Image: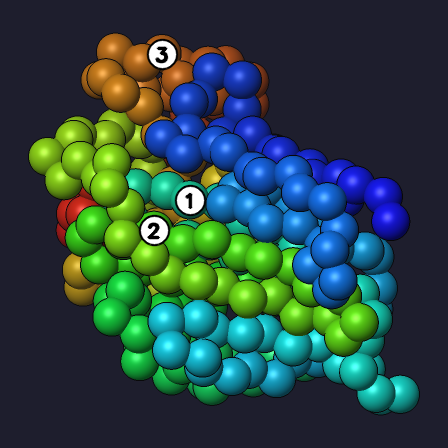
Amino acid sequence: MGTAAVFCVMFCGANVNPIYSYASQIPVLGAVVRVLHVGSGGERTDGAYTETSLQGEHVEIHFESHSGKMNTAPVYSVAHLMAPNRMCLTLHGVRGIDFETIRENMLATSAVKDVYRTMIGDDSMCGFTVVLNSGYTYEITEYADPAYLSIRFLTDEDYQPDRMIYDLRSKAMPYGEELGLLNEKYASDGATQLKTKSGNYIVMIGQFDSMSDAEDALKGLNEKYGEDTGFTVDSGSVDEIPGE
């Protein structure tokens, strides 16, 4: 069998350097299609729904349709961001997701602090954010025949808890349509949604190593849209959850 292609995505634009940006390309052996940390995979589909199981520190998301188990996973994308340490997973062509079971299984692992859904207006897409405990990372393995994703949580030997992260953030707002529309508007700029300490949500763009880099990015964002976008520069340690 051939070698599976792995598609790596730069989630924050040309001037943003993600802390982690690797994906592993491996031969197809048995049911394994690809292993990755950030990037995308799967094949275009519609009408899929999920079932989830917990296997120790692995969480498996299985895909089925009305005709039974699917052979290939639907299109998905994953990003790893900091401040706080989190995984953002988006599934395309999925109209039914057992989010509560996914959340319950993930919280049962030692790696996960919180899990919450992404506000997306398209009912054929769903996504969620997994906030990781300090010092943890993850690896996703895509399988075929039958189709499922295995999310394995593991310790990160290169973790730097004192590292400062700079980014762009919106005002805080409740979980709802405004959040989804704002995230959609800046999707091409690598926008993601993040829950604050108080339980409201903000849209975040970028991940920078210095205040000056973040300020340059904000200037570029305002110039791109020809207006004051309302974003501001924020900072925090890699595990820090932002306030209002």
Name the residue tied to disc 3.
216
CA neighbours of label 2 inside 10 A, class few (<14), some (14 to 19), many (20+): many
Image mark for residue 137: 2
Q: Nearer the viewer, residue 58 or 100?
A: 58
Residue 239 in the image: x percent, y percent?
18, 47
Q: Position of residue 22 (x, y in %)?
A: 51, 33
> Which mark is on residue 19?
none
Look at label 1 and name its amino acid: His
**For the residue marked with disc 3, what is the amino acid?**
Asp
Q: Nearer the viewer, mark 1 or mark 3?
A: 1
- Under circle 2, the secondary element is strand
Q: Secondary structure at mark 3?
A: helix
Q: Are marks 2 and 1 in contact (CB under 8 Å)?
A: yes
Name the side, left or right, on which 162 lies relative to 64.
left
Residue at (31, 74) in percent of width and height: 109
Relative to 44, does residue 169 appear above or below in the rendering? Answer: above
- Give the image location of residue 12, x and y in percent: 49, 30
Real-space CA distance between mark 2 and mark 3, rounded to the nearest whole angstrom: 29 Å
